[in-house]
Amino acid sequence: MYKIFTTERLTIRPVTVADAPFIYSLVNSPKWLQFIGDRNVHSISEAENYIRLKITPQFEKLGYGNYMVVRDKDGVLLGNCGLYDRSGLEGVDIGFAFLEQHEKKGYAYEAARKLVEVAFNEFKLSKIGAITVEDNIASQKLLKKLGLAFTKKIEIDGDELLYFEISK
């Protein structure tokens, strides 16, 4: 129903309710909690509801959203990467999160680079934003490698964030 994307090593497919156990682990991982924040998902059933209420509606509305990143050679779920229409931001932003054991292997860059490409070429977006906390240096480096540039500091829900942007 929704598009699936591939890269040299990865399949990038929409998150489904069947991914709830992975989403539960991801949103409760130490780095997620440190850099993104607590989503109050404390069980698999709450992860299923999170997917139904937060992820699926954006796919239904826009045709894109939060994608699972799957390693092709063995089918292992690595993390997620997505194009988000977030409250508090104008336009669409890109975001990514991977379990720590899958970091520093180029997966986040590979998946995010593909989503930047399809955002411009298939979804016809004219710009993509990104937000991160100031302490998340790894995220900032990845955003810059993708071609996004820091433009300003913003505040969303009382959190001061760095805002990056790229235009087509």
Image (spheres, rainbow, N blue to C red):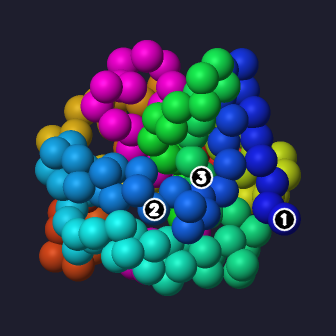
Asked if the residues shown at circle 1 and circle 2 are in contact, with their CB atoms under 8 angstroms apart, the answer is no
Q: Quadrant of the C terminus?
A: top right
Q: Quadrant of the N terminus?
A: bottom right
User: Which sits in the foreground, 56 or 82?
Assistant: 56
Say if the magenta span includes residue 102.
yes
User: Which sits in the foreground, 73 or 168?
Assistant: 73
Q: Position of residue 57 (x, y in %)?
A: 61, 81
Q: Position of residue 17 (x, y in %)?
A: 56, 67
Question: Which residue corresponds to mark 1?
Answer: 1
Q: Label 3 sits on what residue type?
A: Tyr
Q: Label 2 sits on what residue type?
A: Ala
Of the numbered discs in the image, which one, if any, rests on residue 20? 2
For residue 7, what is the image quadrant?
Answer: top right
Q: Is residue 110 above or below residue 114?
A: above
Q: Residue at horizontal 49%, vertical 47%?
A: 80
Q: Residue at horizontal 66%, vertical 56%?
A: 14
What's the distance in space between the residues labelled 1 and 2, CA to CA? 19 Å
What's the distance in space between the residues labelled 2 and 3, CA to CA? 13 Å
Question: Which residue corresponds to mark 3?
Answer: 67
Q: Secondary structure at mark 3?
A: strand
Q: Earlier in the sequence, mark 2 or mark 3?
A: 2
Q: Label 1 sits on what residue type?
A: Met
Q: Which residues are magenta?
A: 85-109
User: Which sits in the foreground, 158 or 166?
Assistant: 158
